[in-house]
Amino acid sequence: MGILGVAGQILLGAALGFAGTGHLTFAREEFQAQVPSWVPLDADFVVLASGVVEICLGLALLSVWRQPARGIVGAITAAFFVAVFPGNIAQFVEQKDGFGMDTDAARGIRLLFQPVLVVWALATTGAVRVLRRSRAS
């Protein structure tokens, strides 16, 4: 992986660590707006649990550099972004304000960035290549 892959992985790891810390502290209420009303768990629990997961993923991205482990961490991170996407959709559909997204346009634009995060996690870690190799063997 080149310098862009390394830099991208570091940036993504740091961003996840920051977001996870926000889940547990200063942005806890804002993140609760993203918990869909149909989730049968306490919204605060979901926010805290997802924050812990984000911190763990961030730490893994910042510390795992050898393949195939690096690609596996990237694939797990991408899967996490897919798993939390329904929360972003719910925020849009339920018209919940959070993080300054108080219009349908703002919430809709945000939806467009979730696939970018998935691609970012896969591309910077070489996850697709690792997954293809594991299927071939």
Image (spheres, rainbow, N blue to C red):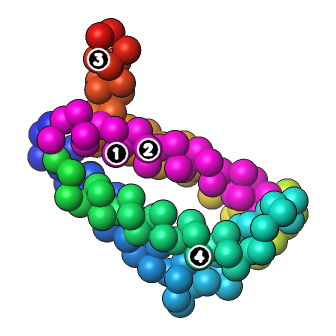
Q: SS for tag 2?
A: helix
Q: CA distance from mark 4 to mark 3?
A: 35 Å
* Amino acid type at image mark 1: Val
Residue topped by disc 3: 133
* Amino acid type at image mark 3: Arg
Label 4 Cα crowd, 10 Å radius (few <14 / some 14-19 / many 20+): many
Residue 33, by quadrant, is: bottom right
- Eyeballing the image, is 30 above or below 117? below
Residue topped by disc 2: 76
User: Residue 53 in the image: x percent, y percent?
Assistant: 48, 63
Q: How many marks?
A: 4
Residue topped by disc 4: 48
Looking at the rendering, in which quadrant would you find the C terminus? top left
Residue topped by disc 1: 73
The residue lying at 39 percent from left, 58 percent from top is 57
The answer, for residue 123, to whether it is visible in the render is no
Left or right: residue 59 compared with residue 67? right
Q: Which residues are magenta?
A: 66-92
Residue extending furthest toward the bottom? 26
Q: SS for tag 4?
A: helix
Q: CA distance from mark 1 to mark 3?
A: 15 Å
- Eyeballing the image, is 23 above or below 61? below
